[in-house]
Amino acid sequence: MIFGLLVLHVAVCVVLACAGRRLGRSSLLVAAVPPACSALWGASRLGADPPATAHVTWVSGLDLAMTFRVDAFAGIMTLIVSGIGVLVFVYAFGYFGPGAAHTGRFATTLLAFSTSMLGLVWADSVWTLFVFWELTSVTSFLLVGHKSTDAEVLVAARRALIVTAAGGLVLLAGLLLVTGAAGTTLISELAPVDGTAATVGAVLVMIAAATKSAQVPFHPWLPGAMVAPTPVSAYLHAATMVKAGVVLVAVAGPALGSISAWKGCGLAFGIASIVWGALGALRHRDTKLILAWGTVSQLGMLITLFSVGTPTAVLAAVSLLVAHALFKGALFLIVGEIDVRAGTRHIDELGGLARSMPVAFAAAVLAGLSMAGAPPLFGFVAKETAIQAALGLDGPEAWIVGFGVIGGSVLTVAYTFRFLIAVFGPGPETPLSPRRHALSVPPAVLAVAGIAAFAVLGPLDAVLEPAAVRLSGGAPVDHLHRWPGLEPALAISAVVLVIGAIVGLAMGRRPGQAPADYAGRWTDASIDGTVAFGRATVARVQHGSLPVYLVTMAAVATLAATPFLADINLDHLVAWHTPLQGVLAATVVGAAVALCFVGTRLGAGLALGAAGITVAAVFVIHGAPDLALTQLLVEAAIVVGFVLAFGHLSRSFPMTGLRWRAVRITVAGLGGVAVVIGLGAASGNPVGAPPLAELAAASVDEGGGSNIVNIILTDIRGLDTLGEVLVLATVALGVQALARGLASTESSAS
């Protein structure tokens, strides 16, 4: 079923890519069909055991496979990704008017992103996860840059792509180290690891998660991405893509949680993001930016709780993950409806919407109170569990986590009340365009889901608890409670609501200016500086001088061979097996030395050919006639090429100084020494017996032939051979292009 759903998503993407222009905005409703099927299947599997799995081998010899596993946690994420995805597609149908341009392209890209995110949360192999991780970066870049004619949009899309793509490279390095230490590439089989490699890998994985989940200092891309259409902001930047980093921390926690650097980095990213994101939400005047900065803060809360790793903290994180998707998705959709109908998102230009938009007002109140952690909403349950997790710690960790959870909760209440008062509070009534039901229903559904989750907390707890057990390494977890009783957590929660409400009421319509986007400017300046440095480096290194290229490559090869000096063992080396080998070796060396001092092009060609033909004779002596024939063919092609080229070149080489000639000879000699070092070290440290019997059997059974060399070239290492053929074809095309260019230059000159 897993592959069937993924194929359905891809098939509809292809259909929309071909017919999206004719379908117009109806393509958004067509695109909602695959997520609806995934959501229904995910809902049917809630609480099911054992997990659903799917596996297809890609390269068996390299243990590369596309592996998927839908367990309790992946089932919850399936409902978030696909369930909210259906509502977003319906909402987008109302968001874009009948005459909106490129809606077919938008629907295709949004469905492609939904497919990528679904593959990410279902992935069980780290390589499968990495592939879909990168696909989410690419598709989100296309969605953020949907309005490609706007310069601000292009800057924001580039910023998002570079930050998240750089995080993907860091993730790849981290996964290589972690899987090497764990001895498996399956996420479900990762066991606790330790050691230097595992520690470095854990830090890299956490950094990658921080880039994707917009943690400080990698956060500027998320507020900048608010230039995207609101359906993109609600789906990617509230409910799904920004959760990718959180999902990574959650599933890697059981294996990496015992590493102190893992928890230290997670708490550093999380606490800083909680505070800085909340302060940003309190300062901004654009409603989408208020919600975006609030998302940075709440993602920091999730990273903090998952990094703590205790059973209660993990249960709180899973609960908050669900609650955040509901209330923040609803609030983003409400802001989008306000923007469409009022023509503005600025809180200084809005007012009186409680009377003119009663449905949106009711949904915003429910979603906002859930975000603030007020009863009777599911956000209250998640916040209470988080406070209990902080109170259950001891030592410095208790103070750090307690400050982040409790202080962040106060600031969350404050910016929530400020948002509700500024948008829906008293003031001159903002003129509105007619209501669109497709804009009103989806946020109302998400807002009501927050109170419904509180009402059916028992069945919901039965779904969330297995996921928390899975992510806490199998440790038992407590149950969620509608009413925690007269405990310190409840008293703290009440104080949080009171203090936060007072701050929010005081700041509700307080005039002010939006803060300057220094972080975004610094990020863009860093990107521009990196690009400028790359261009300058390329201009200096790739300057078109072939001799310098050859010298550089030879020098690098020499340096690369230096570490193998300690592995050389001279005991197994002999001068020659037959005296003829010594004669041929002396001939090759003599031809190479002569080549350094020959002044004419024809003489150089002859010396080079003499060396090549002598090497072919060495192959014959060693019983490799196929290599000898290949070498002779190459030499013949080189001679023909020289003859053709000499007609357009001078007979002699350009005059060069003795210093430059000495440099080239020295580097060439060092390159030969590097090859000798590599061969000597490799031959003295064999890794095993040559698989001659296996190759002979495979050539007959699998290749259907008796010539082992041919079978190796065409079947066993067919991809390598294909690459070599492509290289030769590319070189041939380049030579042809150069010849045509030279011919046209000569004809124009004549």
Image: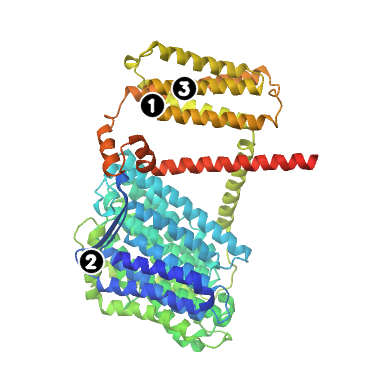
Compared to residue 703, the image places residue 141 above or below, namely below
Cα distance between the residues tagged 2 and 1 = 66 Å
Asked whether 663 or 318 is in front, the reply is 663
Q: Residue furthest top?
A: 579
Mark 3 element type? helix
Q: Amino acid at mark 1?
A: Ala
Q: Amino acid at mark 2?
A: Glu
What number is the disc on residue 465?
Answer: 2
Q: Which residue is mark 1?
A: 624
Q: Residue 391's x, y, as percent?
A: 28, 60
Q: Nearer the viewer, mark 2 or mark 1?
A: 1
Residue displayed at 27% across by 36% down: 696
Question: Badge 1: how crowded within 10 Å, few (<14), some, or many (20+)?
Answer: some
Q: Which residue is mark 3?
A: 615
Compared to residue 674, the image places residue 710 above or below, namely below
Quadrant in which residue 373 is drawn: bottom left
Cα distance between the residues tagged 1 and 3 = 11 Å
